[in-house]
Amino acid sequence: MSNNDYPMSKGDLAAELCIVGPGAMGCLLACRLSATGNRVALVDHDPARAARLNGRGIVLVEDAVETEHAIPVIAPPFNAPPPRWLLICVKRPQTPAALRALGPLLGPESCLVSFQNGIGHEALLAEAVGKARLLCAASALGATLLGEGRVKPAGAGCTRVAAWSSDGAPQAAALVALLAGAGLEAREHPDVRAMLWSKLIVNAAINPVTALAGVPNGALLERDVLRRQAHAAAREGEAVAAALGIALDYADACRRVDEVCAATAANRSSMLQDVERGSATEIDCINGAIVAAGREAGIAVGVNEALCRDILGIR
């Protein structure tokens, strides 16, 4: 156990980093970054939940050891100076509401960093702070939310950071240094579009297949029928990217899917966690994005279309 003096449930904390969304990724990043002395706060849209989390801290469950992290959780209305970094870890459909609520925390020097899955929300974020202060992060970290404020790491991996415009390059370098200082593997990426599509294709292969089968990522390597389905989705995404002139970060999408499944074998994908909670999934901005781009480019995307229908049919 660590710090027993938990912060008050108020929105008046001066933090260098505000992590928006106390889900699996948000809680994991908060624990990692605060452990090395960064001034971190979690941002929650729900004041009642924020108060509960302030009362018991964020719990990291790692190697059967539970560690409490006294990370302040703030909720609207905010009474805090704008932080330098706002790491956006909410789901794509929640982005507009999150931006409206975050107004008081967006200062002239604040930089938004999207840690979100899928594509299509970047324009909204850029409109809020300007292109030069928007970064996108594609993280291979795995995390499973065990309960409110309880998170279990489920696979290590590199976090790549790309600036939305060339003016944001210094911000990207600064964020990579901050993440590396917290013990996280991090690198700059020179091409935001290539980075986002490289992650999109892997997510489109793994997330819906694991969600429909109710299995962790590693099961895709153990069950041939699941592996073939994931590979088929990845090949369609690869073909769409080629038609769009996007140079992916890997030469073979199927091999990359296998590598990610092996590295995050114990992880339950975010889409599987959404399905298990009965929450809306991000299928529209992951597989749906490939379907939309594929149709426009005249590329067959039947596997991704079927995965969209099957996931949407659950609810």
Image (cartoon, helix red, strand yellow):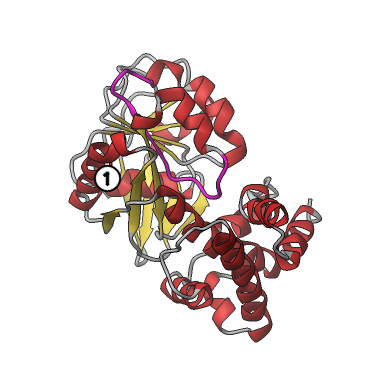
Q: Is residue 180 visible?
A: yes
Query: Hey, which quadrant is residue 114 in on the image?
Result: top left
Region in magenta: 106-120
Q: Residue furthest right?
A: 313
Tell me if mark 1 has few (under 14), some (14-19) or many (20+) residues whose alpha carbon lies within 10 angstroms of its own.
Answer: many
- Residue 193 higher or lower than 169, as above or below: below
- Residue 260 higher or lower than 33, as above or below: below
Name the residue located 45 percent from the left edge and 63 percent from the top edge.
248
Q: Nearer the viewer, residue 147 or 284?
A: 284
Q: Is residue 312 left or right of residue 285?
A: right
The secondary structure that dominates the magenta segment is loop
Q: Secondary structure at mark 1?
A: helix
Q: Is residue 206 visible?
A: no
For badge 1, the amino acid type reads Leu
* Residue 167 pos. (x, y %): 29, 34
The stretch drawn in magenta includes residue 45: no
Q: Nearer the viewer, residue 35 or 291?
A: 291
* Residue 25 pos. (x, y %): 44, 49
Query: How many callouts does the rendering have?
Result: 1
Name the residue located 64 percent from the left edge and 51 percent from the top edge.
289
Q: Which residue is mark 1?
A: 33
* Residue 152 pos. (x, y %): 42, 58
The stretch drawn in magenta includes residue 108: yes
Name the residue located 30 percent from the left edge and 36 percent from the top edge.
168
Name the residue located 73 percent from the left edge and 62 percent from the top edge.
307
* Residue 93 pos. (x, y %): 62, 37
